[in-house]
């Protein structure tokens, strides 16, 4: 049973970069909303509490609810946690699907829908637990690394273009300058990765799980670090299947009677960044892990497409990581030719 079952006041919050809309709903009047917009900063958070108090609603009897909005909601999450105020953070898709057919969309309407969702689901939703500060640091560094990689990729593409120019212009400066920038980005990426590793190794729980995860072939620094962040150090997901659903590698089919049979497929509503990372890891694993290498070749002979096989290998990697975390022992390859 949820700790929110006895709540009577529900505040739906729709967050944007600079502001957020709050919609207050009381259980006794489920169609009567009180609404106000606030700045997405500390002064705005304090003003929101004063406004709620003016509506004669007790914080101890209230539940704040909002959608996942990435970095925009991070300051509010931290502030609510520090204040000891109950709140939950839910996937936007889950909120929309729970309300059936809906029409129209703006920040004010979205805040109302979130408040209504909190009222409807108060018996089942779970409180949001803010990740430890060290995980937030790792997430920020991973985000910065992604930005550096994108810049480096852009420079490499630019270099190819200018190398074509050089064949006619004979100008060396542009090629040399772009080359220097690429080297600078490479050094920055290496420095960020070094810092991520140092932060992970500074906390024993993270270090242990990181080492276990990277014992699986195909799981390197970046994938393991992202897994620590997205699983809250392997506390937010019970098993590999649920995490595979989260990243969009677990296929699902649809059947109804004998006439409707939809081929199993993965959902596009997933953490696409993690799915891409695991696809890269799977491509590496099929070259270096003998079992997965044989599996890949066997499936190719069966006529399976490359992408489908890589997706299946991604699922295997996810399950292997969760298995070693549960066993608390590193992954050991025991595959031999006699097992093909």
Image (cartoon, rainbow, N blue to C red):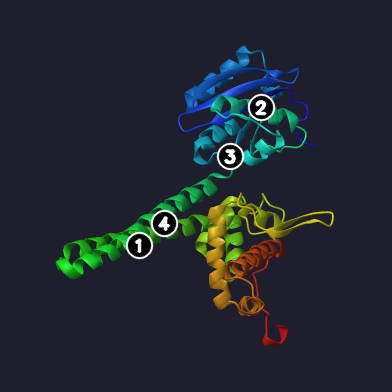
From the image, state whether disc 1 or disc 2 is nearer to you.
2
First of labels 1, 2 by sequence position: 2
- Residue 248, how many percent across, how many down? 62, 55
First of labels 4, 1 by sequence position: 1
Residue underneath mark 3: 68
Residue 42 is left or right of residue 187, and the answer is right
Helix or strand or loop: what does disc 2 sit on? helix
Residue underneath mark 1: 186
| Marks 1,2: beta carbons within 8 A | no
* Separation (CA) of disc 4 from disc 1: 10 Å
* Separation (CA) of disc 2 from disc 4: 40 Å
Q: Dividing the picture into quarters, in which one does residue 281 lie? A: bottom right
From the image, state whether disc 1 or disc 3 is nearer to you.
3
First of labels 2, 4 by sequence position: 2
Helix or strand or loop: what does disc 1 sit on? helix
Say which mark, if any, is on residue 192.
4
From the image, state whether disc 4 or disc 1 is nearer to you.
1
The crowding category of the residue bearing disc 1, from other C-alpha atoms within 10 Å (few below 14, some 14 to 19, many at least 20), is: some
Which residue is depicted at the point 63% across and 30% down?
A: 103
| Marks 4,1: beta carbons within 8 A | no
First of labels 3, 2 by sequence position: 3
The crowding category of the residue bearing disc 4, from other C-alpha atoms within 10 Å (few below 14, some 14 to 19, many at least 20), is: some
From the image, state whether disc 2 or disc 4 is nearer to you.
2
Residue underneath mark 2: 115
* Separation (CA) of disc 1 from disc 3: 32 Å
Q: Is residue 148 above or below residue 330?
A: above
Residue 91 seen in render: no
The crowding category of the residue bearing disc 3, from other C-alpha atoms within 10 Å (few below 14, some 14 to 19, many at least 20), is: some
Q: Dividing the picture into quarters, in which one does residue 68 lie? A: top right
């Amino acid at each position: 049973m949820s700790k929110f079952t006895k709540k009577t006041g529900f505040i739906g919050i729709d967050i944007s970069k600079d502001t957020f809309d709050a919609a207050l709903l009381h259980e006794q009047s489920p169609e009567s909303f009180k609404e106000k917009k606030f700045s997405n900063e500390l002064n705005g958070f304090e003003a929101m509490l004063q406004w709620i108090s003016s509506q004669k609603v007790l914080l101890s009897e209230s539940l704040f609810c909002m959608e996942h909005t990435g970095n925009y909601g991070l300051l509010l999450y931290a502030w609510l946690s520090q204040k000891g105020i109950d709140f939950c953070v839910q996937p936007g898709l889950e909120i929309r699907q729970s309300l059936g057919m809906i029409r129209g969309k703006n920040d004010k309407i979205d805040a109302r829908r979130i408040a209504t969702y909190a009222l409807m689901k108060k018996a089942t939703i779970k409180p949001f637990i803010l990740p430890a500060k060290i995980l937030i640091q790792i997430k920020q560094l991973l985000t910065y690394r992604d930005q550096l990689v994108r810049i480096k990729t852009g420079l490499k593409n630019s270099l190819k273009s200018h190398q074509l120019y050089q064949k006619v212009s004979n100008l060396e400066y542009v090629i040399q300058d772009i080359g220097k920038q690429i080297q600078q980005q490479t050094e920055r990426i290496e420095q960020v990765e070094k810092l991520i590793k140092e932060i992970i190794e500074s906390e024993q729980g993270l270090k242990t799980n990181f080492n276990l995860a990277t014992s699986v072939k195909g799981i390197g620094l970046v994938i393991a670090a992202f897994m620590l962040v997205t699983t809250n150090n392997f506390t937010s997901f019970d098993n590999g299947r649920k995490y595979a659903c989260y990243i969009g590698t677990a296929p699902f089919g649809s059947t109804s009677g004998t006439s409707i049979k939809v081929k199993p497929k993965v959902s596009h509503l997933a953490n696409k960044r993690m799915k891409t990372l695991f696809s890269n890891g799977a491509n590496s694993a099929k070259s270096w892990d003998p079992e997965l290498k044989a599996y890949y070749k066997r499936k190719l002979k069966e006529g399976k497409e490359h992408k489908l096989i890589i997706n299946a290998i991604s699922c295997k990697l996810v399950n292997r990581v969760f298995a070693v975390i549960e066993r608390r022992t590193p992954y050991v390859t025991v595959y031999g030719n006699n097992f093909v």
